[in-house]
Image: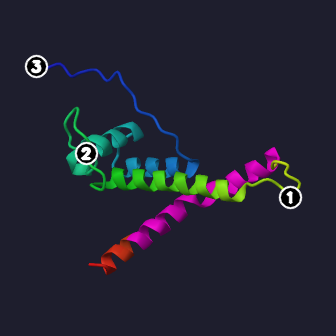
Amino acid sequence: MVKASLRTKSIGTKVSDAEYAALEARARAENLTLSEWMRAQLLEPSAGGGTGRPGGTCRPGVGAADDLLGEVVLAEVLALRALFLNLRPLPDHALPGEAEVRAEIARVDATKMQRARERLAAQKKASEAGR
């Protein structure tokens, strides 16, 4: 009998409470723990996330994990862009206070995934119209 290799490495990412709940719900729907579900999304070809081979590479645009990753990355970029554009020095050249910065971060975080999905949907519609 071949001894299974021990899992000694981990991969981490930060997600919002809403994103965590969505991922957890997807795992529960398949009767898996979140760790099992994420591993399957990243490594198993049936999940569409990767090659299913140790050392294999994930191919962008292939499956659900890639779609989610793309949404999260785009959401973060859009949030940073919104913060950059909306947090500027006050008329007297003073920097915004901590409360103002935290309020703006909360506002941007609340809508970042929705904005990313809207951008992706608009891009998909435009590319389908160009075919």
Please name which of the two marks, 2 or 1, marks the residue nearer to the observer. Answer: 1
Magenta residues, as a range?
Answer: 97-123
Above or below residue 30? Residue 11 is above
Q: Nearer the viewer, residue 114 or 129?
A: 129
Q: CA distance from mark 2 to mark 3?
A: 27 Å
The residue indicated by pointer 2 is 50
Q: Position of residue 43 (x, y in %)?
A: 26, 40
Return the mark for residue 42. Answer: none
Please name which of the two marks, 3 or 1, marks the residue nearer to the observer. Answer: 1
Q: Badge 3 local density, few (<14 within 10 Å), some, or many (20+)? A: few
Residue 115 on the magenta span: yes
Q: Position of residue 17 (x, y in %)?
A: 57, 47
- Left or right: 70 with respect to 50? right
Q: Amino acid at mark 3?
A: Met
Please name which of the two marks, 2 or 3, marks the residue nearer to the observer. Answer: 2
- Left or right: 10 with respect to 62? right
Residue 4 on the magenta span: no
* SS for dot 2: loop
* SS for dot 1: loop
Q: Earlier in the sequence, mark 3 or mark 1?
A: 3
* SS for dot 3: loop
Q: Nearer the viewer, residue 5 or 124?
A: 124
The residue lying at 31 percent from left, 76 percent from top is 128
The residue lying at 43 percent from left, 66 percent from top is 120
Q: CA distance from mark 3 to mark 1?
A: 73 Å
The residue indicated by pointer 1 is 91
The N terminus sits in image quarter: top left
Above or below residue 34? Residue 62 is below
Q: Amino acid at mark 1?
A: Pro
Q: Nearer the viewer, residue 93 or 111?
A: 93
